[in-house]
Amino acid sequence: MAERLKVGIIGGTGMVGQRFVQLLDGHPWFEVVSIAASGRSAGKTYEESVQNRWKMAGPIPEQVKNIIVQDAAKVEEVAADVDFVFCAVDMKKDEILALEEAYAKTGTPVISNNSAHRWTPDVPMVIPEINPEHIEVIAAQRKRLGTKTGFIAVKPNCSIQSYVPALNALLDFKPTQVVASTYQAISGAGKNFTDWPDMLDNVIPYIGGEEEKSEQEPLRIWGHVAGGEIVKASSPLITTQCIRVPVTDGHLATVFVSFENKPSKEEIIQRWSQFTGRPQELGLPSAPKQFITYFEEENRPQTKLDRDIERGMGVSVGRLREDSLYDFKFVGLSHNTLRGAAGGAVLIAELLKAEGYIQPK
């Protein structure tokens, strides 16, 4: 690509915003030219705005240190400088709904890490390897918003990335019932152990709203486009428990599943090993070469060892075995701030660019 697309990050000072900044450093297609946040940070350099609260392992990328942070509420000013934006803000749901639509109405594509628009009927919620065809609904959304080039696309909840890809590879066998318990890292709450000392040597058996998202969002991903909106699937029946554990990054899931047409263990492993999607076909920069990796070892995947597989964009599974109540059980793992958050959103943006939905203004 001769010229990279100009990117803005709305909410660029928070943990997910910082991850966007880090991931986009040296990206072959995209260049961060604008960072916006609350009025408290506006007017400062990016380096000043995240001083003493930079949470990434590496240093702040040089190319963004001196970017002057803009006020995210000044939509027209921010949108004027960019081809599209990533959005990861900490605001009330109705405020996020309004803010993202305001950006879209300026003709600016919005790739959102927020949950506010996940159930807006004409907003695609995408895992690029699984439901890339859902981006077709953007045409109806643009008509509603009155824009030729703007739109909103969202990534799903981080908790489902550790098991939905594994189940998706098995949809031909018609899963009927799924029980999943997720063991979720503290970075999913935007925190580290310095911020949240109560998590040391502790497990909290509740994450607000997470179980509802984990049970319903997979059905929207497995739905279809009809009449200018996403119609969610009616099966399988999913029940979950979501638990916070003392881990920095990585969401692990234990999964039980029954099928209408029970496969063999060998068939399941083959489906996982061979599963590819549109990102792999297109060779997108952030796409993992091997989307799902199966471990034969009894004690894998492990969060600390395996969360960074395929640069944190792959999904790991293991411990597949038959169950006494359900057909099979297994363990899944994904990196919640890479595949599950900023990395997943970057991959969506790459897909939308490759498919012609994001272009230079």
Image (cartoon, rainbow, N blue to C red):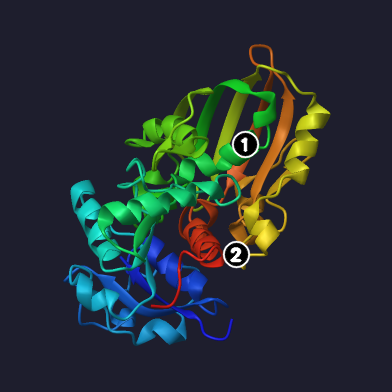
C-alpha span from label 1 to label 2: 20 Å
Instruction: Estimate the x, y position of residue 162 in percent, counting from the top left.
Output: 57, 41
Q: Is residue 356 visible?
A: yes
User: Residue 3, relative to residue 97: is it above or below?
Assistant: below
In the visual, does 333 lie left or right of 15?
right
Q: Secondary structure at mark 2?
A: loop
Q: Secondary structure at mark 1?
A: helix
Amino acid type indicated by mark 1 = Asn
**First of labels 1, 2 by sequence position:** 1
- Give the amino acid at mark 2: Ser
User: Residue 168's mark?
Assistant: 1
| Residue 288 in sight | no
Q: Residue at x 60, y 56 (%)?
A: 313
Q: Residue 359's x, y, as percent?
A: 45, 73
Q: How many marks?
A: 2
Q: Quadrant of the N terminus?
A: bottom right
Q: Which mark is residue 55?
A: none
Q: Residue at x 49, y 39 (%)?
A: 221
Would you place residue 10 above or below residue 127 in this image?
Answer: below
| Residue on which disc 2 sits | 286
Frontmost residue, 150 versus 57 = 150
Using the image as rendered, state which of residue 356 and residue 170 is in the foreground. 356
Q: Is residue 296 left or right of residue 41?
A: right
Give the crowd class for mark 2: few <14, some 14-19, many >=20 residues within 10 Å.
Answer: many
Residue at (51, 30) in percent of width and height: 181
